[in-house]
Amino acid sequence: MHDHPLPILTVDVVLLSLRDGALQVGLTRRDKDPFQGEWALPGGYIHTDTDADTTATARRVARDKAGLQDVYCEQLATISGPERDPRGWSATVVHYALVRGAVPKDSPLKWRPAAAPGPLAFDHNGLIAATLERLRGKGAYSNLPAFFLPAAFTLSELRSTYEQVLGQPLNDAAFRRKIEESGFVTPLPGQLSKATARPAQLYELTDTSLKFSHRRI
Amino acid sequence: MHDHPLPILTVDVVLLSLRDGALQVGLTRRDKDPFQGEWALPGGYIHTDTDADTTATARRVARDKAGLQDVYCEQLATISGPERDPRGWSATVVHYALVRGAVPKDSPLKWRPAAAPGPLAFDHNGLIAATLERLRGKGAYSNLPAFFLPAAFTLSELRSTYEQVLGQPLNDAAFRRKIEESGFVTPLPGQLSKATARPAQLYELTDTSLKFSHRRI
DNA sequence: AAAATAGTGTCTGTGAGACAGTATCGC
DNA sequence: GCGATACTGTCTCACAGACACTATTTT
């Protein structure tokens, strides 16, 4: 059929969560060689008997290795080469997954700041950096950052989330205008948050799928 | 090492060229099963002894199967699943490659309109459609469309290229303003095109690598 | 001169940023 | 009342589209 050996093919998942006002990435400790004992992104092999595609593999990894059911998962890119894995020529289909709301207390992962996760196995530091860059690019024109929030949220929380994802402060009045006109969110009638000062209107995502805006948020 | 069989991993290339005022895609006829005799994207297996990564594989395919040396090549995505190849669970790392200038006369490929390439093997129609979508998205904010042009070009040719890629007409005055301010191109001093009417200033790309603009072109 | 393409100047509407001002809570 | 957070109204500047206008070539 073919006269070239197939490369090692894996799926790695950059699990991201918004916690303590900063993007955090979920890491696991490797229990086998190569890089045994070092921190790494959760990942695994494709189960050709059950996985519908590599995104299904990523979802399975998030569920089985991290206990996370409710994530927004998307493919980032495939990174490959002869040197990145000591076992030989390898390719990894990298996905990123945004955790909705707070991370469960019993999460088996270690959560580290995504901007400075510490030294990791393989080229995983680079994969996280590439994910953050993609997130910044896509987040400025879509409802992607809202996938970090629980079902109901205030516009102040939403703006703060966009600021964390985009890495820059946003003008409050302009943000409200643009979000209003984007149609990304719908107010929950009568529901107000119980904040420390004046209560704020609660909103939910109009559509929980990825939506784009023709304007920059 | 692992108890799951490795999927079939290939690299497919969506070769694109601007010809006769429309985007054309380069196709090859399959000489073996599956889909023997049908039209398909050029592709192949990774040569783990020589290829530095999957983009190197794509460049090698463009060179050996299409005779194209001077292409801009970039990864699109990895498409995978149990059904897309009758031989079993497979993944293909799709790249797209933009051919600079005219296609050589002796190109062994058949060139078909990218918007309507006819029925193709595997899921290759979908891969072409996804490439066109990516091209539209990326082309509106970058110098990507200019990679279809030869080294020297006029602003009218550049605008026409952007219009082909974006699929919509562009305002001439606004286009000149935006291109001017983007810094994407540099005038070639004294050189003028020998067009049918008034000669036009010739330009070249300031930087032949992919550059982004903060404004929409 | 007419046709054709290249290139410029100017008006206008839209939208983003800035920021002051108002509203509603806890204390 | 005061502080804090939520929200709104308005001004201004930047920029995109429209389009008329000028410029330079071939025929």
Image (spheres, coloured by chain):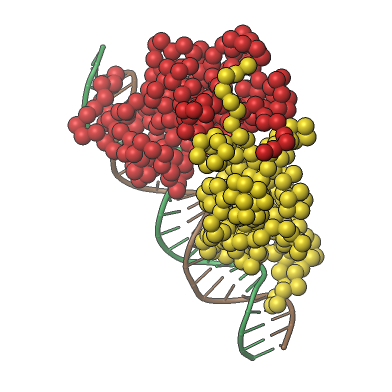
Chain colours: A yellow, B red, C brown, D green
Instruction: Determine the residue positioned at 56% across, 23% down.
Output: A4
Q: Is residue B170 left or right of residue B202?
A: right
Residue, far left: B190
Q: Is residue A144 visible?
A: no
Residue, far right: A190
**Quadrant location, the N terminus of chain A:** top right
Instruction: Determine the residue positioned at 51% across, 18% down.
Output: B26
Instruction: Determine the residue positioned at 65% across, 64% down.
Output: A19
Of residues B134 and D14, the one nearer the viewer is B134
The answer to which image quadrant residue C8 occupies is top left
Of residues A121 and D14, the one nearer the viewer is A121
Look at the picture and state if B104 lies above or below D9: above
Look at the picture and state if B135 lies above or below D26: below
Where residue A14 sits in the image (x, y, percent)? Answer: 63, 50
The answer to which image quadrant residue B187 occupies is top left
**Quadrant location, the C terminus of chain A:** bottom right
Of residues B143 and A201, the one nearer the viewer is B143
